[in-house]
Image (cartoon, rainbow, N blue to C red):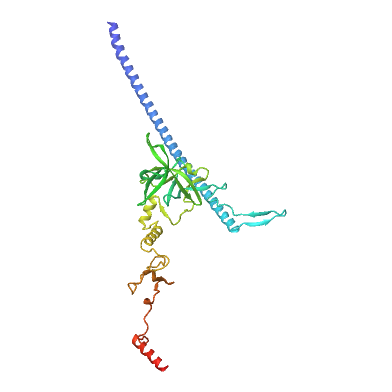
């Protein structure tokens, strides 16, 4: 009995102590959680502050880099402008070569320097990202994209057909751009396989040889024929044409002058659309000249004589003079110096006054009187 009573006393006491210990542990754990949460919040706050500082530093570094880049670009442009000014000054001073005789009898000739805005010191041309190239076979100038990433040049071609000329294979195709169509015929060179960069497949393109000119440089080069009607440029210039003759400055456009200033020109699609919105026809002078030439060939064949039918004296038709005598040959109409025609026979001469004319009867009477007098 005594042991049972002791157990009945010990068990509740033990349970109470355990409960008290658990409650104390729970309070301690709660305190620890609160401390940890506070510590974590403090760390998060510090991290947020550091992130803000890092972001501010990055923005400041970016601004400094931008300023440095802008400053470098500005310095570069100023150097280029200074070089152009020096070049212009030198050219103005030495428009004509200056010959100077040395003490040893030799003659020294001072020539103008190169235009380093358009050529490098070693004589290579400087091409911009866009340049005007004249294509002889098309008799037109194209705003071309100079692409150093393309191995070969290409030109827009539609309605491609093959034919034979003098036993050799030729290609006829249409260039459709700026709401115009030009038909070109060129000798066939070969067929090349081109891998598309945006796809894994490839296609075959005919290659022709064309005569091109930029500024005062002329050459022949191979061009791939591909439909570029929906692309910005009808003509693309690749490395095969640029090699050993030019360097490219993509930050500039149309550095070299047009080889054919008054001929037909095809612009970039965006440039053509802008000109069209402004009511500007880039080929106005060319269209006017073509109209005059067509009119001259069809309606005004004479350039040596005839009456002028307009402001241009070269556009003239021979003046037609009706012969009064129908039996008179047309060859008797000779051109005058002023462009009109005159009649050479007596029938075309003007009539004399009626009083001065005598009839055959009056002539016979006068002859009789003269005989009687004698």
Q: Is 312 located above or below residue 130 in the figure?
A: below
Q: Is 208 located above or below residue 286 in the figure?
A: above
User: Residue 234, can we see it?
Assistant: no
Position of residue 295 measured from the top left corner of the image (x, y, whole percent): 37, 61
Residue in the foreground of this view, choosing between 300 and 112: 300
**Which residue lies most toward the bottom here?**
373
Res. 351 image quadrant: bottom left
Residue in the foreground of this view, choosing between 208 and 328: 328
Residue in the foreground of this view, choosing between 43 and 115: 115
Residue placed at 28% from the left, 7% from the top?
Answer: 4
**Direction from residue 16 to residue 233 in the image, left or right:** right
Residue in the foreground of this view, choosing between 121 and 99: 99
Residue placed at 40% from the left, 91% from the top?
Answer: 371
**Which residue lies most toward the top here?**
1
Position of residue 36 measured from the top left corner of the image (x, y, whole percent): 39, 28
**Which residue lies most toward the right here?**
104
User: Residue 222, can we see it?
Assistant: yes
Q: Quadrant where the N terminus lies?
A: top left
Residue placed at 36% from the left, 88% from the top?
Answer: 364
Position of residue 214 measured from the top left corner of the image (x, y, whole percent): 48, 50
Position of residue 285 measured from the top left corner of the image (x, y, whole percent): 41, 59
Instruction: Give the total number of marks visible in the rendering.
Output: 0
Q: Quadrant where the C terminus lies?
A: bottom left
């Amino acid at each position: 009995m005594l042991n049972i009573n002791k157990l009945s006393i010990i068990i509740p006491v033990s349970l109470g102590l355990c409960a008290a210990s658990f409650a104390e542990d729970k309070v301690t754990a709660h305190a620890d959680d609160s401390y940890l949460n506070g510590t974590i919040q403090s760390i998060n706050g510090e991290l947020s502050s550091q992130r803000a500082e890092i972001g501010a530093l990055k923005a400041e570094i970016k601004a400094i880099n931008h300023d440095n880049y802008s400053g470098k670009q500005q310095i570069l442009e100023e150097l280029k402008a200074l070089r152009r000014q020096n070049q212009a000054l030198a050219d103005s001073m030495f428009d004509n070569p200056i010959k100077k005789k040395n003490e040893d009898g030799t003659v020294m000739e001072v020539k103008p320097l190169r235009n380093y805005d358009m050529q490098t010191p070693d004589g290579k041309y400087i091409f911009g990202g866009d340049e005007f190239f004249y294509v002889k076979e098309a008799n037109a100038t194209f705003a071309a994209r100079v692409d150093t990433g393309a191995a070969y040049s290409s030109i827009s071609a539609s309605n491609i057909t093959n034919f034979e000329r003098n036993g050799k294979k030729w290609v006829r195709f249409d260039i459709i751009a700026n709401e115009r169509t030009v038909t070109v015929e060129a000798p066939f060179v070969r067929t090349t396989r081109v891998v598309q960069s945006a796809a894994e497949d490839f296609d075959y393109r005919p290659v022709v040889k064309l005569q091109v000119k930029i500024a005062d440089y002329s050459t022949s080069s191979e061009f791939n024929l591909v439909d570029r009607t929906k692309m910005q440029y009808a003509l693309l210039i690749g490395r095969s044409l640029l090699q050993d003759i030019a360097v490219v400055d993509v930050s500039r456009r149309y550095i070299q002058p047009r080889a054919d200033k008054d001929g037909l020109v095809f612009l970039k699609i965006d440039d053509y659309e802008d000109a069209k919105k402004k009511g500007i026809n880039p080929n106005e002078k060319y269209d006017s000249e073509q109209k005059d030439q067509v009119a001259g060939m069809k309606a005004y064949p004479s350039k040596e004589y005839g009456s002028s039918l307009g402001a241009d004296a070269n556009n003239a038709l021979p003046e037609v003079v009706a012969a009064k005598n129908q039996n008179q040959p047309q060859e008797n109409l000779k051109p005058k110096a002023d462009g009109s025609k005159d009649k050479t026979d007596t029938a075309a001469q003007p009539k004399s006054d009626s009083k001065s004319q005598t009839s055959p009867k009056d002539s016979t009477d006068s002859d009789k009187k003269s005989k009687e007098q004698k």
